[in-house]
């Protein structure tokens, strides 16, 4: 029997750095990136509900988060995995990134 392949765990620091390099409206970076606490091979990207972002329109937040999402997908590809993107039902302007080994 061959041993099971080691499970991939995202390098969250590299993924956060990739997201932070994304352009955003007014250079606000209105997002938060984290690993899913129940499944550590899932990276979650959330639009940041910070009230200091009041000058940004929802459309501008969505555009900025889209740029971060693109960079996160590239960072996952650089690690040798193919990302799959799922929108979380019931949440507004939130995206869930999952890499499938």
Image: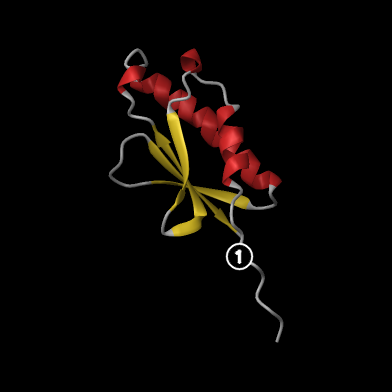
Q: In which quadrant of the rendered view does residue 17 lie?
A: top right
Picture coordinates of residue 7, whole percent (x, y): 61, 65
- Secondary structure beneath label 1: loop
Q: Quadrant of the C terminus?
A: bottom right
Q: Residue at x 49, y 53 (%)?
A: 42
Say if 38 sits above or below 2 in the image: above
Q: Residue at x 63, y 40 (%)?
A: 14
User: Is residue 24 found left or right of 76 in the rendered image?
Assistant: left
Picture coordinates of residue 58, whole percent (x, y): 34, 22
Q: Residue at x 61, y 59 (%)?
A: 8
Say if 70 sits above or below 44 in the image: above
Say if 56 sits above or below 71 in the image: above
Which residue is under mark 1? 7
Given residues 55 and 51, the one toward you in this image is 51
User: Is residue 101 found left or right of 64 in the rendered image?
Assistant: right
Picture coordinates of residue 94, whole percent (x, y): 38, 38
Q: Quadrant of the N terminus?
A: bottom right
Picture coordinates of residue 90, whole percent (x, y): 28, 44
């Amino acid at each position: 029997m061959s041993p099971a392949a080691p499970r991939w765990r995202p390098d969250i620091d590299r993924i956060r750095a990739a997201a932070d390099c994304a352009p955003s409206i007014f250079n606000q970076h209105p997002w938060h990136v984290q690993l899913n606490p129940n499944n550590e091979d899932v990276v979650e990207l959330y639009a940041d509900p910070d009230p200091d972002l009041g000058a940004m329109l929802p459309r501008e937040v969505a555009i900025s988060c889209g740029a971060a999402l693109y960079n996160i997908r590239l960072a996952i590809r650089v690690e040798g995995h193919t990302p799959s993107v799922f929108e979380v039902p019931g949440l507004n302007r939130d995206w869930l990134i999952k890499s499938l080994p």
